[in-house]
Amino acid sequence: MSKKVKRTYTDDELIRRVTDIEEIKKLANKRVYYIINEWREQELSDLWVSDPAYQATASFGRNTGYYVGMDAIRGYYVTKHAADLGDGVGTMNVHPISTGLVELAGDGKTAKGLWYSIGQDTTPNGDGTAKALWNTGKVAIDFVKEGDDWKIWHIVEANDCTAEAGSEYSEQPVYIDYATDPVAVEFGTPTIPMITHDATFNWWDNYPTPPVPYDTWSDEISYGPEGYPEKVEYHFGAGEGGNY
Amino acid sequence: MRELTLHERIRNADASQQVENVKAKHAYLHGRADATGEWSVLWSRSDDCSWAHAFGRMRGFDQVYHGSVGDYDMMCMQNWLDLYQVYPEVTGKDPRPLMECSVHTLVTDVIEVAADGQSARGSFITPGVIHSRLTADPDKDGVVHRSPKYCHVLWERYGSDFVCEDGEWKYLHEHVCPDLVGDMDHTNWAADEFARITDPNPGEMMPPTLGQPRVTDPGPMHMPYSVLKPPQNTVPWPEPYETLDNDNTYTPFVR
């Protein structure tokens, strides 16, 4: 992993970094409004990477895997969603983010951020009724600077709790059935299907991991699949000091 | 307060962001019940450290460490022993995050960095959630059984002081003020509290935090909402200030 190198900055460099972090926070916040307004196609074109090299490695992850590359992301995030949505009447998806933790690379070229969302997804059932869900979870984002603008490169939305509004959460099954779990069903079949975050065990798997200070980018710190930490093995695979 | 130079303003703008990150790191470490991690990297080791909740205020790093790490880990381990009876898949897993996922989300912050650049103060609101899927409890005969999973809401306010030590920002004081706690989907804190206090045999208020560590300054310091109480402004937002002192702190210093 890229180790933090303690740099010192001139006043000009430091105010540039302060401004960059504020721009990154605004970018993450704007994405929330794009989601509310169902501007998913515009989100990908306005907020995400445009450089072909970054587009090839862009990724969108949830608990059940990653879509990799902008074409695959668009296929899920825009095309599949539009087919599921119909005319959009009765839709309201709001994922406000809080608890921001942004680490700007020492070289100022990339950044990583983590937020927590207590949000809701309300989707039409197609018969005049709609399903209203509470959803909570982490939102982890890698950013890269293209020219003068910050862009989204990788996202992981790691769901913790899903509950139908007005229902007794505690009466729902403890174990997650990925065949019927609304978040897993909505995510479809990703490019890389895998369990990235098993909410059965709370945050035991610590994914996505909070960002730490770093000097320059390396794939092993990515929120894309290339940066997924080796799964903590238990039982016979734990190794010395494992699981702690 | 004196006018800051441009250099000092830039320094303090950076410091404000660093303090936001310290506070957020606390939230993510606490969500995994990683108290050892939190207190090993985020906190000053000063005798002036303090951590306060409804139960009172712990003072000095040693007392805070034992109350917030030792006592907390003990609850996690006891919980794991119960879980193991009914959920054998917890075998080999770190007991701490299995206790619960306590996510004190952070919003509405007001942060002031001292003119001398050596400290910062912040007030925050946390409309958080606390959830856990695998839960177990012993019955009155001591037999452990599976309990329902839960998702609570917990709203609190924070008053937090930070200090800059060798260029790194560290926690010095934390004052947690619980306002409401209950099940996510059906708690009515006003109706519940009215029903409790008008019951001929009123039960205990739902505890606003886990445990009752040893404290130096006894509580109660800030109690959850009650139909009998006016609003409590226990941790008012910080005003611009020159240096951390008894006029600008969430914990008065003892000399």
Image (tube, coloured by chain):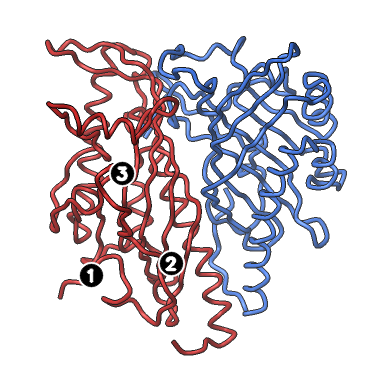
Which mark is in front, 1 or 3? Answer: 3
State whether residue A242 appears in this view.
no
Give the Cα separation between the discs numbered 2 and 3: 36 Å
The picture places residue B163, in percent across and down from the top left corner, at 37, 69
Q: Colour of chain A?
A: blue
Q: Chain of mark 3?
A: B
State whether residue A233 appears in this view.
yes
Task: Output the letter for the chain in red.
Answer: B
The picture places residue A217, in percent across and down from the top left corner, at 67, 52
Question: In percent of the image, x 58 and y 24: which residue is there?
Answer: A133
Instruction: Using the image as rendered, state which of residue B88 and residue A136 is in the foreground.
Output: A136
Instruction: Using the image as rendered, state which of residue B119 and residue B44 is in the foreground.
Output: B119
Mark 3: which amino acid?
Tyr
Q: Is residue A133 left or right of residue B91?
A: right
Find disc 2 in the rendering and name its residue. B168
Give the Cα separation between the discs numbered 1 and 2: 23 Å
Q: Earlier in the sequence, mark 2 or mark 3?
A: 2
Q: Earlier in the sequence, mark 1 or mark 2?
A: 2
Name the disc covering residue B225, or none: 3
Find disc 1 in the rendering and name its residue. B252
Mark 1: which amino acid?
Pro
